[in-house]
Image (cartoon, helix red, strand yellow):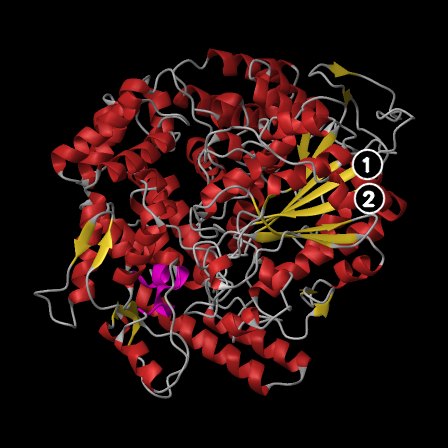
Amino acid sequence: MKTKAFIRRVGFGLKPDEPVPSNPLDWAKDQMTVVPKLIWPGRLYTENEMIDIRIDFQLEEDKIQDTEKNPAKAKLKKRKLNRRTGRKFFEKYELAIRHHQAVHGDQPVFERFWHFWGNHFTIVDKNKLPVFNTGPMQREQLRPLMTGNFSDMVYNMTITWPMIKSLDNFKSAGPNSETNVYRKRKNKRVKGLNENHGRELLELHTISPKAGYTQEDVINTAYIMTGWGFTGWKKGHKGDLKKTGYEHYNHEPGTHKVLGKEYKTSGFSKKTQGKKQLRELVNDLCSSESCRNFIAWKLCRHFICDNPSKEMIKTVTDAWLKSKGSLIDIHKAVLEAAWKYGETEEKFLSPETWLIQIARMTGADWPGDPQIFEYDFKSKLNYKQKKIKWILAELGHLPYRAKQPNGFPDTEAEWLSQEYLVRRIALVNNPTQIGLYKNSLPEIDISKKMVNKNFDDPAELLEVLEKLEIKNEGSNSLIATLCSRKVLKV
Amino acid sequence: MNISRRVFLSGSASLIVTAPMISNVFGSSLTKKNLVVVMLRGGMDGLTAVPFIGNNILANARPDIGVKKPLKLTSDFALHPQLKTFKKLWDKDKASIFHATSIPYKGRSHFEGQYLMESGGTLPYYDKTGWLGRALETGNRKSLSISLPMPLILRGGRDLDNFMPSSNKLPSDETLKILADDYSKDKVLSNVLNTIRQRPIAMMQNSKNANQDVKKLAKIAGEQLAQSDGPNIAVFDIAGFDTHADQGGNNGEHAKKLRQFDQIISTLETEMSSAFENTMIVSLTEFGRTLDQNGGSGTEHGYGSAILMAGGLLHKSKIISDWPGLEKKNLFEGRDLNSSVDARAVYASILARVLDSDHKQIVKKAFFGADLPDMTNRIFG
């Protein structure tokens, strides 16, 4: 591929003052070996802290609901609670950390992969997960896993707190588990099996329906997963539990067969058998050909084109086999495939990727000085703090708010519609919203600089800009470039 | 009458500048009929929307999430209490239910199922166009999807637009023209931008309090559908029917979502006034859910569900079903309500009526000539 197109295809384009790498493929590959530190200068709330804050919020909210019967007073109390616990603040804060890293960091290709995996392991928009938990989990758990092995990533993401909550596994119990044997004896209603997480582990996270599994396989996967949930419940406990873990008394005992293989319990103690079964199952799923093909296809579709060719996919699956699933090698192979086969392809960028690209390439003040995101947990949020979430919502791409566990789509047919395009054009029509201020460089200069820096063949766009300059229509230059076909599609 | 801002797109992709007042594109002989498809994503539970009350099987299978005091329709079937407008229309012979039906997909995956409910085919991720779009590929018919994406169900159609109110403003048409030149070699981008440029003024204005309140969205769609030169197809998209946990009975997630569906119907009825007489609203989902409740007071992915139909084009309210029964032996794979009719047959017959087309032609275009019986008499008779 040509240098600058490649940098936009797999990264976020070049900042106005960023040097053009002499070997773009190595430049990109080198970014995959070390997890970059987050450059956000403000406080990074830990995942555990956020679960605490969430529990605090929930208990208080329930209390208000139960005790305050005066609607006006209840509303006031809730507002105060919202501010004290940052209910309206944290999602915007996490988005700011994410965008600050992508726009200003120096491993943008790594960040693209981080966004990809965050979407692959989607935490559904429910139960206030995007408010308190999804962002911190992606920072703290997902990021460090990106230089390890794929099966470790799948295993650890499967048992992470938001995932267990998002896909309901904490509600699942085996029909013959100790819990249900006891309940049956006491004539209590049994706790049923929940297939949701088991199905998505197969369908979305590893092997996809192309692997040809059956309903029986789904049920047996769900059996293997029984026991994984929240732990530490004691009498009188209210609200969510803080830790995820394995509770053997919910686990369906015995051997479970998935895709022809028996997952046995012999040799393991009662307290660990379900743990071992899940680990073994994830290892098997991740070393299967269906999994390699599915994940390689999905990566190529994201980084190269909507319909990746066999050669592209094979570049990735070969590296996968050779390295036994090392994500560093898999990621590098994706970049190699993009470099080798990407020249003749085009990729329509998702709204969030496009927004980050135009911010990075123009040197916009986006998402804004980190200092503006400092919050006293008392006041109403101001415009500058709110706008990142509002703008991403406007573009239709709030990354922590996918409605379904398959996450956001990744093709032109899904992302190109009248209304989506209207919103991109209308956003650039008001460039101060994305941190391109009237008092900075004239718009025409920003545009020219961006085009010269980021296009291998800038002539066509420069010609448009020159025409605008002659007609004294420099104010149209940002729309003419940032919404041009060549910026929307790389 | 809609006033287009500047140009009117004819059946072909070329731009024709016309006077702002446009004559009725449907000619004088035919009344404009409207079809509204409401997609209910996640697997709408037909047994929650339209519970079977002919025996105790359903009630016993769902001790925690059974619908209490449903609105009685017949001796065998009742309606979820949140479907109030639907019940009002039922009482006026303007609402019907097709029960125990599904698209021909038994795989229980949402994403394959949703793909197929929109594509109308039988292979997931295979067809790149949708059944509604293909049915509309000829003729002067316009469609409007009330969603941010252009849903697969409409793709392949000609005069498509989609809409959600937004608070940002588009630049002048002179500015858009710069982009139109830039997009000129890209057919897809050009088409999309051309549609934007000739949207009616009502859809060009930014709205300060833009939100996703379903009633507000239905109001916009209703206004457009009621125009004689407006769209005659509208698509809504409601997600959130995948209730593995906390499905609820009278309240809870399924109830909330059914209420949204009902609000769409009531808003359209009000907003469209007399045009509602020539309108048909139908629901669409990827599959139904298990008979039994599960571990989390929810239900699992199943097979058969129900199609809810409302609007002035119906003449008699009825439950249409070859009811398979809820006894274990009658359930699909011993767990789900079965499907006795391919749901595509229902949609094909509705399409034929709304588009004044031949049933066979519709089946051929929209559903690849699948073997689908004509349901016209059962639905409209």
Circle 2 is placed at which residue position? B313
How many other residues sit within 10 Å of disc 2, few (<14), some (14-19) or many (≥20)? Answer: many
Q: Chain of mark 2?
A: B
Nearer to us in this view, A425 or B233: B233
Q: In which image quadrant can residue B18 be found?
A: top right
Of the 4 image quadrants, the one containing the C terminus of chain B is top right
The image shows a total of numbered marks equal to 2
Q: Amino acid at mark 1?
A: Lys
Query: Residue B84 at x, y = what percent?
Result: 75, 64
Question: Is residue B250 rendered to the left or right of residue B334?
Answer: right
Query: Residue A319 at x, y = what percent?
Result: 17, 31
User: Of helix, strand and loop, which mostly describes the magenta segment?
Assistant: helix
Circle 1 is placed at which residue position? B33
Question: Is residue B187 rendered to the left or right of residue A30?
Answer: right
Q: Secondary structure at mark 1?
A: loop
Residue farthest toward the front in the current orientation of the protein: B329
Of the 4 image quadrants, the one containing the N terminus of chain B is top right
Q: Quick one: label 1 or label 2, which is nearer the N terminus?
A: 1
Q: Amino acid at mark 2?
A: Leu
Nearer to us in this view, B41 or A52: B41
Q: Is residue A44 above or below residue B277?
A: below
Q: Which residues are magenta?
A: A160-174
Residue B136 can be seen, yes or no: no
Q: Is residue A131 above or below residue A325?
A: below
